[in-house]
Image (tube, rainbow, N blue to C red):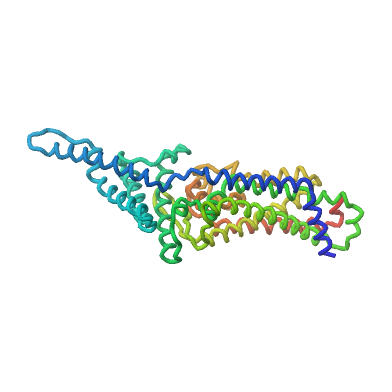
Amino acid sequence: MKQRYFLFQLKTFLNNPKNIGLFILTILVSLYFGLISVPNHQVIERVEQRTIRKEYVDDSVFLKGAQIEVAYAKKPGYNYIPSKGAIDAVNTYPQILRYDKKMLKALKDKNWQTYTKNSSKHYKYIDHLIFNNGNKNFLYPIEYNHNNNYLQDGHYGYQRTYHLYNALLLSNKRDHIVLNKNILEERTALQSIQTSLCGWTVLIILLIICFFSSDVITNDKKYLTVFETIPLSKRTILWLKTGVIEVGVLLDLLTAAVIILACIVPRYGFGSFQMNTVAYMGQINYKSIFLVESLGTYYLQFLVFAALIVFILIRMNILITLVIRNEYLSGIFVSLFAISGKVLYFSSGMGFVYPVLKKLPMTYFTIGDSLNGSLAYMMDTPGWGFNTGIIPLVTLVIIIELLLFLVTKCKRLQLVE
């Protein structure tokens, strides 16, 4: 009987016009992401031979002028003080030019290991000059000014690139991952999906899941006489309904994944689960701590978070629908709950001011922000990753299950009214 009921519910779910519309929406969004969003994504730290060559030529010309200016000031009998820019150039540009020369040669020879090694040193050195020494001859890319926090965001961006390149070199040495431009720019399928699965992207997926589960109880009114005679307990019926929605959500996400991979892989490659990535774990002002982990570990943690959050939203929707008997209100409430963290308190420094936010399950609903360290950077305190987030999520699951247990124990409660 359980199998027959499950299959009937699954057929009803898949034939539901609302759910069909959500499947179509998922397909359209996936096509947009794979065909338009990914190819047009602007990478700040691009690998471009022309840009490096221009920097090399410009810096060489500037250094030559600076050396003449400094040498002129050293001539006996001249009371001349060279500019600070000229002095800084004489002291720093030779090292920059050595890195640029090696990078250009590596690109010409297609030696990506050598390029990555010298580029990593290049980012570290320039970041030290800008952030620690206040050298005005160098600037972070203007793209880092999108949050009106140019110096801090630029420092974070350069530090992340430095640590990422070192992590990729480790993958090359230990796991024999062949480096290329797409890997360094994080354009492979696994890397593109990783960088996109955060913020509103994840929340939109969660909202779709809320819509999938909104009428899971009230839809049975169409078959009232049939379900009144089913010899299954209330809890069994609710578990089967939960399973139906999870299967539907899984089919929806698998469809999206296949479409996205079909669009990205031919152009940029698949990537590798053994390839390393980095997650920010510390306070950028004091000590820059980046955790190195494989993409396989990242996606495993992502799937654990996603499974818990999807389960929470489905069971919460069922619970609220049973209590208020209104699919629209329950859908609205659960949807607002899903986006509450992002809307209410996702802003710079909030974690430092209100440490309690670390214990709220909604904080981790954007998933990717927690796992890649963006949340720790925004909250300005360490410890917003997987190990921290798993506790409030599991706690919320237990609370919802206890409430559902109490509600279904009520003899007066009818699943279908």
Which quadrant holds the N terminus? Answer: bottom right
**Residue shown at the point (63%, 48%) measured from the top left:** 30
Camera-nearest residue between 146 and 183: 183
Residue 299 visible in the current orientation: yes
Q: In this image, 413 relative to 92: left or right?
A: right
Residue 243, quarter of the rendered image: bottom right
Camera-nearest residue between 80 and 415: 80
In the depicted structure, whether residue 95 falls above or below residue 234: above
Residue at the far left: name it. Answer: 77
Q: In this image, 221 relative to 288: left or right?
A: right
Residue 391, quarter of the rendered image: bottom right
**Residue shown at the point (38%, 58%) measured from the top left:** 113
Residue at the far bottom: name it. Answer: 174
**Residue shown at the point (91%, 59%) measured from the top left:** 229
Q: How many marks?
A: 0
Q: Position of residue 268 (x, y in %)?
A: 51, 52
Q: Position of residue 373 (x, y in %)?
A: 50, 52
Q: Position of residue 38 (x, y in %)?
A: 54, 46
Q: Position of residue 278 (x, y in %)?
A: 47, 56
Camera-nearest residue between 296 and 27: 27
**Residue shown at the point (88%, 63%) measured from the top left:** 231
In the depicted structure, whether residue 109 falls above or below residue 147: below
Residue 311 visible in the current orientation: no
